[in-house]
Amino acid sequence: MAGRAVLLVGTLAAAVVLTLPGAAGAATPLPGSDTGTVGTPASGVAADGTVRGFVDAHNHIFAQEAFGGRMICGKVYDVAGPQVALKDCPDHYPDGSGAVVENLLRTGSPLGTHDPVGWPTFKDWPAHDSLTHQQDYYPWIERAWRGGLRIMVNHLVANRQLCELYWLKQNSCNEMDTIRLEAQRTRELQAFIDDQSGGPGKGWFRIVYSPAEARSVIAAGKLAVVLGIEISEPFGCRQLIGIPLCSQSDIDKGLTEVYNLGVRSMFVCHKFDNALCGVRFDSETQGSIVQVGNLLGSLTTWDVETCTGPAHDNTVQGSTVPTPHCNKKGLTSLGDYMVRGMMRRHMIVEIDHMSVKAADQTLKILESAHYPGVISAHSWEDTTYLPRIYALGGMVTQYGNPSQQFVDEWRRTKPIRQQYGITGYGYGLDSNGFGKLPGARPNNSGNPVRYPFTSLDGSVTLNRLTTGQRTWDVNVDGVSHYGLVPDWIQDLKILGGQELANDMLRGAEQYLRTWEGATRA
């Protein structure tokens, strides 16, 4: 989840036409399933046997079930069609003035209005900066797959504190209950897409449990979906006045359960200090609000000190401690136990959101074991650690930043990747994660994305996407939802050229090499 989530604390034409079986067994067209693409997605395997395609290492397909299940409006799918799935929250009617969370996330003020009508007009949502409306409707993900996406990490997400503070809810605030529900929903989506595609195993959306299975899925031209977890209190490992409320036994039991659920990648801490590690601070006003959440959840505040090395956490607003700021709290003994437990299970360790002290300690554990299974998936770790991640054989994927910023960071870090022989690059869009998606590139009239365009792998032609009565153009709308990801990547190519395109197409292969390294360690 991106930093803006914390405001809640205190923040050619259609592709394959999908069908829904009718009462008598006849196939009835399901509206809203157009992807605006023509052609058959490539098998995803290059001549040398490596896979070709993009990797999104950080997404939240079923965040609609998190935070009590009433915070994100709309569904990934509904068997009744988009008129039910793409519907605003009841509390947003009649004019959006009751959408306090939406307004806070969008403008920083609880006041505001929007047209709550989604399907079929979509006047005001989805939009790149509308953060409580569904961004992962399944045909939009399908368009991204058709446009070259081959691996997506679906992070099962929850936050007890946000859930308890929000006044509307229909689901449990227990983080593990939410994780179980989102894993179930992901399996249900796979079955739904299978039904639309002709039967079990025939759909383009495939949950995978090993690198070998992912390679097989990609070779078949389908999307490999890896399950991850991003929560603030794994297995109940919160702290109260510095006292941990979990044990090694809880960690063992929890890791075994989530592994059996299919989870292969996981965060150790997120947003709030927990019994496992200290977090990388949020900065400015958001940081102040997160501190309130930290205090409410644990009866402690962040313990800030002046950093003594090159790595540092974000600056804490209002602190009297001289900058640069670091969280005094690193990896606890329980956190050390959890990292080693993940290694024993050959899982990928996510170090984003760890304090620099915790990240340093975690990297030392991984380095001593020569364990490659580590990733910084969405630009939430100090960049001085990039060489250590790459030296291990790990991966770094950039947050879904606006096009020019994304390309600038790709260029800036290019020498580090070259030093360690890293040839693939990816992104972590954080869709449905309360962070803005990339907006339209400013002053793009001289070199816009021109429709139709061809996917980077050359297999599919993409037109402007129409869902219902709304047609989107990335030059105007930016990435309003996940269906505009191929358009955004085309925009990246305009700025970064074929070299960037090649790196993006090697992203899935690089991710698999990191995962394979973890399975062999």
Image: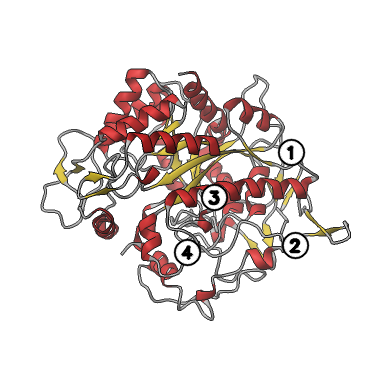
The label nearer to you, 2 versus 3, is 3
For residue 253, side relative to residue 261 (left or right): left
* Image: 339 above or below 152: above
Residue at mark 1: 201
Residue at mark 2: 31
Q: Amino acid at mark 1?
A: Gly
Task: Determine the CA span between mark 1 and mark 4.
Answer: 32 Å
Q: Residue at x 60, y 73 (%)?
A: 117
Q: What SS does tag 2 mark?
A: loop
Q: Amino acid at mark 3?
A: Glu
Q: Residue at x 38, y 68 (%)?
A: 104
Q: Position of residue 35 (x, y in %)?
A: 70, 53
Task: Determine the CA span between mark 1 and mark 2.
Answer: 23 Å
Q: Residue at x 33, y 34 (%)?
A: 248
Q: Amino acid at mark 4?
A: Met
Residue at mark 4: 71
For residue 3, side relative to residue 137 (left or right): left
Q: Position of residue 386 (x, y in %)?
A: 35, 31
Residue farthest toward the bottom in the current orientation of the protein: 94
Q: What SS does tag 3 mark?
A: helix
Say few, some or many: other residues with alpha carbon within 10 Å of mark 1 (under 14 / 14 to 19 / 20 or more).
Answer: some
Q: Is residue 409 visible?
A: yes
Residue at mark 3: 182
Please tell me which of labels 4 and 3 falls first in the chain. Answer: 4
Circle number at residue 364: none
Task: Determine the CA span between mark 2 and mark 3.
Answer: 25 Å
